Image (cartoon, helix red, strand yellow):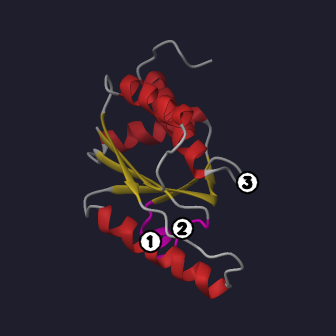
Amino acid sequence: MNIRIIAIGKLKEKYWQDAVKEYSKRLGAYCSLEIVELKESMLRANASAADEEAVKKAEGEEILGRIKKSDYVITLEIRGKALTSEQLAEKINALGLEGRSDIAFVIGGSLGLSQEVSKRADFKLSFSAMTFPHQMMRVILLEQIYRSFKINRNETYHK
């Protein structure tokens, strides 16, 4: 299975980089993993709603440019569907059984995702009704993908 995480923003802090490196190493036994970091658009202080939309649109175009036609796209969105770890594992397993071996997870920037990216999603996933920093979500997502593979292989880790 090929997993690609398309994320707005670079991880600047070493502790986020270390966590991503650890889960990336662990996932190497289960899938091919690629992390695509896209530049976060700058937003001036006191930006208008139109300025914010322009930033989301620009970031969205960058994201869409990295999505392949064959990708099954899972966007991380507050208004998406919440799944348990077991349900996410089932979803990943089902995609593999359907021959959908290219999965792209998309993490937007601080303003979220553009409508165009959201429309491209095959599945909208919510980790919580709360808002988290996108750097943290990258680590949480990697951990949950790793947990999914462990669950699907009945290996110890989960619980």
Q: Is the C-beta separation of discs 3 and 1 under 8 Å?
A: no
| Distance in Å between CA atoms under marks 2 and 3 | 15 Å
Q: Where's the C terminus, which quadrant?
A: top right
Q: Is residue 57 magenta?
A: no
Nearer to the camera, 95 or 7: 7
Indicate the secondary structure of the residue bearing disc 1.
Answer: helix
Question: Which mark, residue 129?
Answer: 3
Residue drawn where x is 60% and y is 43% of the image? 136
Q: Which of pointers 3 and 1 lies earlier in the amino acid sequence?
A: 1
Instruction: Indicate the amino acid at tag 3.
Output: Ala
Question: Is 7 placed left or right of 102 in the picture?
Answer: right
Q: Give the labeled residue for mark 2.
A: 113
Residue drawn where x is 40% and y is 23% of the image? 26
**Image coords of residue 59 (percent x, y):** 45, 70
120 versus 72 height, above or below: below
- Whether residue 148 is visible here, answered yes or no, is no
Nearer to the camera, 114 or 127: 114
Residue 39, image quadrant: bottom left
Residue drawn where x is 25% and y is 58% of the image? 70
Q: Is the C-beta separation of discs 2 and 1 under 8 Å?
A: yes
